[in-house]
């Protein structure tokens, strides 16, 4: 088992490095950096939804919190290392509180979705109405609808004058995504991860085995938020501006679509979904023939109807078919799709 | 400076401009001067952006028809920012990194301007923001030709108060423009012996004003001044009229009509609103009439023309004149030529660059909406941007890069 | 003495104005949520394209008025018919394959909502359109009231009464209630659940269309306007709980009151945030909705 784990990690690293070096040959690195931030965001929801069974309708809230924390802290500290750390910790802390509120209240699936949705709407409304001069955090004006432009972008730790942007930013972001991916893999292989999957499959049984489901769900929720926050920080340094639309319903919707299209219950699927769909949106944005929302919507409907398990399992099957490998059966998607009993 | 065109020569010029890239005999792509624009041609601010885009294309074709700039054709690279502030920085980065443009014209809302101004400054790309705004931006890399509060609100407020009364209620859009403009309005109300009895701010997506209209009535002001912005806020004027308030309390605005709102509202809904701008279609000057004819030749009718479309058009010609004087599109050379008190005359009268602030001295007209038109009541000639002059001096501090705000 | 009573009278007028505004806010929520409530209450389907169904109703009205149809005919007949028919088609094409898979229906409807926004942009342009309200304002003492608010209140009230009457008084309502509680039994009695679901979805869609149509004169319609409705409708329906009419009325009542109270006292933004906060608090206290604790067993 340990040997298999090592082999798996090695495979991920090799594949990751090949992709990191190979992709810039096909796609502009400026666009790739955005796709990576989105991929990380998709992975964050893929983790809590696909493996923990927690459908969060407001994952964008943590993304936005991360981005805003990065911008606000950057203006106050005039460098980016501490802001980057805070961009992970603040959303995680927020998620701990929110998660505790929800999971200790034993809310059902649909109600969880409503609460997360409402919380992200509240954040959106609030941030959107902070244009007045009184809304400041330290030296930073929150700016409301304007968002916050002109904050310090990512720099080499300890050297605020050495800024990371352009191609370098791409490599930093890509390597960070690889590290996060490895950490997620490790987490899922740990007993915590296996119990999380157990909770997803049968909450009652795991509970009867003596595990504290509420605490475990809360912690998983916070880990997802931390990853989303990091993605937000990368987005902020890429875009050089943060705006309230980061918190919007539209943004949350897109994350869910990425996960579905890529493949729920897999680690690579959400990243793939984010990459493919965000690139598609970008490419469609270059033309005026057909509206990109129409295409995205169509893709989602078709996937739900005909390919509900997403791209990744199909790709894996194709891979096994080509290599003839029968190492293990394709990972089944056991995401919570059954009817919700309450409501 | 603006050459009169007839329809045929305009069409020929458009054809030449579009064909220029393909026909090596006329001009090659690398010879072209590259002008970038970022404007909201769709989304809730498209009423502002679409006519600006039309004006931009008209101005470019005029220049190309007259033989281009410095004997080089002008190539336009425009991006539609879809009323999304985040798209502004993306497209501005693309304009400077990939498209290597010589100048960027654009930005509509103040939020969009602030989103891209620093990016362009960092990239040493000259920037023109051609829209009326709250004033106070001090940046040597940028030029501003829209009316500012000292040019607009300073005359609008006493005029509107003299026709109504001293108790004023302010309703403003909740972002930098509305916030800062509201403070200027408060100042001018106080300066003229009035009192601001209420002030509310609305996010740009609010479209239900019922409770606000009830609240205004409990205060019973003599005058409402409404710097509201965008498609959603248009419903305020509708609901105001639907409640019958337009017959009871006079209304003035620093933005109404900028996006041709007075043509979207019915005459009953719009009549009597008081505004002050640099331009009105009803200005009967030879240059304005010629401009309207060229516009009709290009687009069929004058429906789309509005205040900021014209100021965008004027801004582009100001830059073109700067390039001609400098004999180059080099950023520093153009800035120096512009700072030499350069002026241009066009549909909205004379505009002169103020070297100290990079803003412009221009005409302002007090107007009243009447049957979907802006009737000029009084014209004030050549008003300098004194609000920005009080805080900004680029001749002495060329490295200044701040937006100064009014303080009490 | 006279002065005091004038003031008193003025206060009375103000109370009337505020009362109308509160009733209007409640009516707004009832209208916006009704279509979603029918579909969710009967079928346990959360239609996230509900907002776009409403916008379709708005566009249908504006188009019909543009073609010379009387505005009331356009709002009360044309729009519900158009959107109801559209719902019928969509149900046959997409949703009927997904019954029993709650999350999947939700996602498919989300995809549908994006498609509709895209289609609106392509057909009607990404711009603001609108019609003017057909009813003039009128005076209450010293105050002016938007006459159209009364129209909205009346329509919402009639809608609630009609829903109650249909569910309670007609055979179709009885069958629908039966199918809602025990689909297997209804099926065994010879009522095809497939047909009941189809008709329910069409009726829910028609209600969404009606809501969009009557609200269109108040707002500038943009292709993305649906987003402003769906969140509040979703919250209202979930907070209302299992009883259709009682849940709709009680949740709308609570949220409308909270919203308008804070809108009037502070600002519309605070009003909206207060509504959302109230929703979170309510769901934390009554995690299965208002009607699990109160009005239990009612419709």
Image (cartoon, coloured by chain):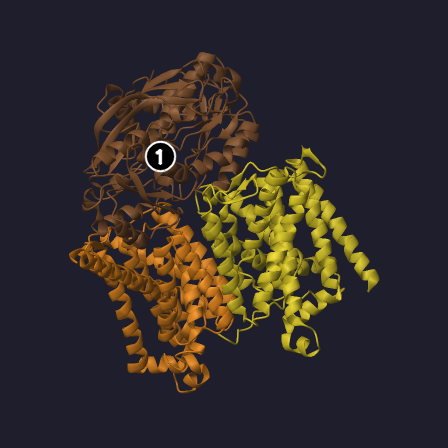
Chain colours: A yellow, B brown, C orange
Q: Where is residue C222 in the image (x, y as percent from the top left)?
A: 36, 49
Q: Where is residue B389 in the image (x, y as percent from the top left)?
A: 42, 23
Q: Mark 1 lies on which chain?
A: B
Q: Position of residue B345 (x, y in %)?
A: 32, 18
Q: Quadrant of the C terminus of chain C?
A: bottom left
* Residue topped by disc 1: B187
Q: Where is residue C144 in the image (x, y as percent from the top left)?
A: 21, 54
Residue C260 location, quadrant: bottom left
The residue under the point 56% across, 64% down is A55
Q: Secondary structure beneath disc 1?
A: helix
The residue under the point 29% across, 18% down is B4
Asked if B64 appears above or below A287 in the picture, the reply is above
The residue under the point 47% across, 12% down is B327
On the picture, is B213 further left or further right than C227?
left
Asked if B123 appears above or below A313 in the picture, the reply is above
| View extreme (left): residue | C2
Asked if B230 appears above or below A204 in the picture, the reply is above
Asked if B379 appears above or below A285 in the picture, the reply is above
Count neighbours of disc 1 (C-alpha within 10 A) and say few if under 14, some if 14 to 19, many if 20 or more: many
**Which residue is at the front of the view, A71 or A295?**
A71
**Which residue is at the front of the view, B334 or C171?**
B334
Quick check: can you spot residue C75? no
Residue C187 location, quadrant: bottom left
């Amino acid at each position: 088992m340990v040997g298999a784990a090592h082999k798996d990690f090695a495979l991920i690293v090799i594949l990751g490095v090949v992709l990191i070096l190979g992709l810039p040959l096909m796609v502009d690195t400026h666009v790739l950096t955005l796709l990576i931030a989105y991929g990380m965001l998709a992975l964050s929801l893929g983790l809590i939804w696909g493996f923990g069974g927690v459908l969060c309708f407001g994952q964008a809230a943590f993304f936005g919190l991360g981005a805003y924390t990065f911008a606000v802290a950057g203006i106050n500290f005039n460098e980016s290392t501490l802001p980057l750390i805070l961009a992970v910790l603040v959303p995680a802390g927020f998620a701990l509180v929110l998660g505790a509120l929800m999971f200790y209240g034993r809310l059902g699936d649909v109600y969880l979705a409503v609460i997360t949705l409402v919380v992200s709407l509240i954040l959106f409304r609030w941030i959107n109405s902070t244009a007045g001069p009184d809304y400041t955090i330290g030296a930073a004006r929150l700016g409301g609808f304007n968002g916050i432009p002109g904050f310090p972008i990512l720099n080499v730790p300890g050297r605020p004058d050495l800024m990371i942007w352009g191609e370098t930013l791409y490599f930093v972001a890509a390597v960070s995504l690889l590290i996060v991916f490895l950490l997620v893999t490790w987490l899922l292989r740990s007993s915590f991860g296996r119990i999380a999957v157990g909770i997803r499959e049968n909450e009652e049984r795991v509970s009867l085995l003596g595990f504290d489901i509420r605490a475990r769900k809360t912690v998983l929720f916070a880990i997802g938020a931390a990853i989303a926050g990091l993605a937000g920080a990368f987005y902020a340094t890429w875009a050089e501006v943060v705006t309230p639309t980061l918190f919007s319903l539209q943004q949350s919707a897109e994350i869910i679509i990425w996960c579905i299209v890529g493949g729920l219950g897999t680690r690579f699927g959400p990243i793939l979904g984010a990459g493919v769909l965000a690139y598609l949106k970008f490419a469609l944005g270059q033309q005026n023939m057909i509206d990109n929302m129409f295409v995205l919507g169509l893709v989602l409907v078709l996937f739900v109807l005909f390919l509900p398990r997403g791209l990744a399992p199909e790709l894996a099957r194709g891979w096994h078919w080509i290599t003839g490998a029968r190492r293990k059966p394709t990972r089944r998607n056991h995401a919570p799709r059954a009817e919700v009993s309450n409501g | 400076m603006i050459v009169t065109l007839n329809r045929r020569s305009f069409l020929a010029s458009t054809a030449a401009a579009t064909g220029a890239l393909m026909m090596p005999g006329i001009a090659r792509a690398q010879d072209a001067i590259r002008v970038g624009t970022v404007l909201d041609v769709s989304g809730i601010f498209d009423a502002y952006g679409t006519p600006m885009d039309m004006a931009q294309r008209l101005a470019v074709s005029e220049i190309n028809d007259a033989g281009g700039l410095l004997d080089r054709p002008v190539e336009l690279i425009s991006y539609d920012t879809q009323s999304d502030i985040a798209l502004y920085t993306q497209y501005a980065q693309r304009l400077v990194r990939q498209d290597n443009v010589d100048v960027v014209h654009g930005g509509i809302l103040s939020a969009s301007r602030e989103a891209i101004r620093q990016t362009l400054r960092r990239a040493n790309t000259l920037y023109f923001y051609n829209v009326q705004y709250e004033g106070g931006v001090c940046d040597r890399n940028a030029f501003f030709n829209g009316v500012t509060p000292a040019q607009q609100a300073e005359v609008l407020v006493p005029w509107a108060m003299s026709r109504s009364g001293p108790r004023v209620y302010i309703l403003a859009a909740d972002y930098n423009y509305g916030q800062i403009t509201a403070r200027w309005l408060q100042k001018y109300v106080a300066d003229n012996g009035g009192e601001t009895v209420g002030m509310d701010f609305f996010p740009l997506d609010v479209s239900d004003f019922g409770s606000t209209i009830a609240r205004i009535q409990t205060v019973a002001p003599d005058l409402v001044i409404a710097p509201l912005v965008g498609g959603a806020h248009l419903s305020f004027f509708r609901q105001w009229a639907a409640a019958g308030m337009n017959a009871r309390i006079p209304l003035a605005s620093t933005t109404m009509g900028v996006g041709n709102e007075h043509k979207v509202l019915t005459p009953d809904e719009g009549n009597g609103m008081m505004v002050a701008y640099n331009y009105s279609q009803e200005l009967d000057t030879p240059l304005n009439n010629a401009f309207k004819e060229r516009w009709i030749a290009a687009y069929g009718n004058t429906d789309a023309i509005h205040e900021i479309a014209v100021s965008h058009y004027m801004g582009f010609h100001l830059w073109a004149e700067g390039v001609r004087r400098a004999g180059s599109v080099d950023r520093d050379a153009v800035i120096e030529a512009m700072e030499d008190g350069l002026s241009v005359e066009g549909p909205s009268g004379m505009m002169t660059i103020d070297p100290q602030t990079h803003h412009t001295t221009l005409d302002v007209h007090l107007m009243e909406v009447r049957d979907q038109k802006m009737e000029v009541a009084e014209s004030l000639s050549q008003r300098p941007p004194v609000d920005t002059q009080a805080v900004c001096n680029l001749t002495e501090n060329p490295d200044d890069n701040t937006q100064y705000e009014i303080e009490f | 003495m006279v002065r005091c009573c004038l003031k008193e009278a003025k206060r009375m007028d103000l109370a009337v104005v505020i009362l109308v505004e509160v009733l209007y806010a409640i009516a707004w929520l009832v209208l916006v949520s009704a279509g979603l409530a029918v579909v969710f209450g009967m079928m346990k389907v959360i239609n996230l394209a509900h907002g776009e169904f409403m916008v379709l109703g708005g566009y249908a009205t504006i188009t019909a008025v543009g073609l010379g149809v009387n505005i009331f005919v356009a709002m009360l007949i044309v729009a519900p018919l158009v959107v109801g028919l559209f719902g019928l088609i969509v149900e046959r094409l997409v949703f009927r394959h997904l019954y029993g898979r709650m999350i999947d229906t939700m996602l498919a409807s989300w995809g549908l909502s994006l498609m509709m926004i895209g289609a609106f942009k392509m057909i009607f342009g990404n711009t603001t359109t609108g019609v003017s309200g057909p009813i003039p304002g009128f005076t209450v003492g010293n105050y002016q009231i938007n006459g159209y608010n009364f129209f909205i209140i009346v329509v919402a009230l009639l809608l609630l009464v009609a829903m109650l009457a249909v569910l309670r008084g007609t055979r179709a309502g009885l069958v629908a209630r039966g199918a809602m509680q025990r689909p297997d039994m209804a099926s065994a009695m010879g009522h095809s659940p497939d047909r009941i679901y189809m008709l329910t979805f069409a009726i829910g869609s028609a209600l969404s269309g009606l809501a969009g149509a009557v609200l269109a004169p108040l707002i500038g319609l943009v292709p993305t306007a649906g987003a402003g409705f769906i969140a509040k409708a979703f919250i209202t329906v979930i907070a209302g709980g299992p009883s259709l009419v009682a849940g709709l009325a009680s949740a709308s009542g609570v949220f409308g009151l909270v919203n308008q109270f804070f809108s009037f006292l502070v600002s519309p933004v605070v009003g909206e945030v207060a509504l959302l906060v109230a929703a979170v608090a309510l769901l934390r206290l009554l995690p299965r909705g208002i009607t699990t604790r109160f009005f239990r067993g009612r419709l």
